[in-house]
Amino acid sequence: MRSPQEPSGRWYEDFTLGETFDLGARTIGDDDIRRFAEVSGDHNPLHLDDAYAASSPLGGRVAHGVLGLAAATGLLNAFGLTRGTLVAFAGLTWRFRAPIRPDETVRATARVATLRTTSKPDRGLVELDVELCGEDGEIRQSGRLTFLVRRRSAAAP
C-alpha cells in the first residue's frame, strides 16, 4: 500500500512524446454554470438568461468559456497523471472553438507534445495538447497546458 506522500502519478521520465490519454468525461450542468457565475463574478446573461441568450448570435445559453477550461483541468487532475509529482502549472495557450451548452457532456483527451528539462535537476516541463470535445465529437476547446513535473533522477536520496 502506498503512503499518502508517495506519488502515484507519473514522473517526468515516465512521459513519452506522442503518448495519449483519455481523461474521461463530465457533464457541465446548469448548476455548474450558475455556481461558476457566482465564484467568478461573471453574470453575463449569455450564461444565465434563457430569453436574452436565445436572441443572441449563439441562439441560446452557453457555459462560460473558462468553465470549459476548468473542466478540462479537473478531468486531468482526476485522472491522476501527475498526482504527487506536479510542482506547478506553468502556463497555457487555449482556444475557444465552439460553445458548450448547459447539460452537455464533454470529454477530454491529452497528448504529450513536448518534454523539456529545466536548469533545475529536480524538475522538467511536460506540455500536453488537450482537446475538450462535445457529445458529437466536435472540438469545443483545445490548447496546450504546460506543467512542471518532478524528475525521478533528482528525487533519489
Image: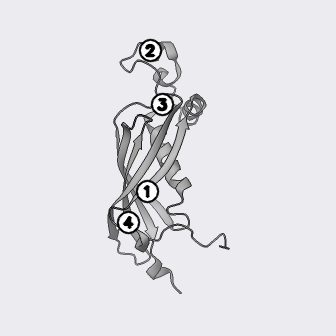
Image coordinates of residue 141 in percent, x first then y, are 38, 40
At horizontal 54% and vertical 30% (from top left) the residue drawn is: 103
Task: Read off the residue under disc 3.
Answer: 63
Q: Amino acid at mark 2?
A: Ala
Label 4 vs label 3: CA separation?
31 Å
Label 1 vs label 3: CA separation?
25 Å
Q: Amino acid at mark 4?
A: Leu
**Which circle's residue, 2 or 4, is located before the other in the chain?**
2
Task: Read off the residue under disc 2.
Answer: 54
Label 2 vs label 4: CA separation?
43 Å
- Between label 2 and label 4, give the one nearer the viewer: 2
Image coordinates of residue 24 in percent, x first then y, are 50, 48
Q: Are marks 3 and 2 in contact (CB under 8 Å)?
A: no
Label 3 vs label 2: CA separation?
14 Å
Residue 93 showing in the rendered view: no
**Which circle's residue, 1 or 4, is located before the other in the chain?**
1
Q: Which quadrant of the figure has residue 95? A: top left
Q: Secondary structure at mark 2?
A: helix
Q: Secondary structure at mark 4?
A: strand
Closest to the observer: 106 or 36? 106
Q: Which quadrant of the figure has residue 132? A: top left
| 52 over 141 or under it: above or below | above
- Between label 1 and label 4, give the one nearer the viewer: 1
Tell me the number on the disc at residue 21. 1
Q: Amino acid at mark 1?
A: Phe
| 61 over 10 or under it: above or below | above
Horizontally, is 44 left or right of 34 in the view?
Answer: left
Image coordinates of residue 51 in percent, x first then y, are 49, 12
Task: Read off the residue under disc 4.
Answer: 125
